[in-house]
Image (cartoon, rainbow, N blue to C red):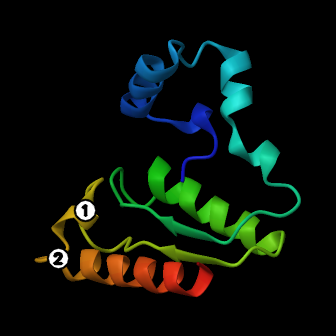
Amino acid sequence: ACMDPTTFDWKLSAMLGCFMGSGRDDKETMALLNARQFLKDRFIPCWINASNEGGPNGSFLTEAREMEQLMKKIGVDCDAVWFPDADLPHGYMDNYETDPQAREAIDRLTSFLKAHL
């Protein structure tokens, strides 16, 4: 749940540059991509997930926590799933069959979808 591209680490910035054809120095694109500007009123129910790649203060967890707080503030139903004390890289949910955190995340996603579809 990365909402503010100015907080991206070098890897996410490089990915953004490849996808958008611009980088962190393009202030206009960065402002346009900042999702916070679109989340001021109401939003659909959301399921938020983040790995802890980058540590407890890494961009994934930081942005996910901020998004959860914003969703609660504007009254949007959300389920936020992360495991800051586990060693979980980006894409950890791919290990559903062997990783208990991945299994819990997928199970919570499934329950969330059943409740909101």
Q: Secondary structure at mark 2?
A: loop
Query: Position of 28 compared to 9: left or right?
Result: right
| Percent of width and height locating residue 51 | 36, 60
| Percent of width and height locating residue 59 | 48, 48
Distance, label 2 to label 1, CA atoms, is 8 Å
Query: Position of 111 compared to 55: left or right?
Result: right
Q: What amino acid is found at the position of numbered circle 1 in the picture?
A: Tyr
Residue on which disc 1 sits: 92
Of residues 75 and 25, the one drawn nearer to the viewer in this rendering: 75
Residue on which disc 2 sits: 99
Q: Quadrant of residue 43?
A: bottom right
Relative to 11, say whether 104 is above or below: below
Q: Earlier in the sequence, mark 2 or mark 1?
A: 1
| Percent of width and height locating residue 110 | 41, 81
Neighbour tally class for label 2: few under 14, some 14-19, many 20 plus, Cα within 10 Å: some
Q: Residue at x 84, y 64 (%)?
A: 42
Query: Position of 116 compared to 92: left or right?
Result: right
Q: Residue at x 40, y 27 (%)?
A: 15
Q: What quarter of the picture does the C terminus occupy? A: bottom right
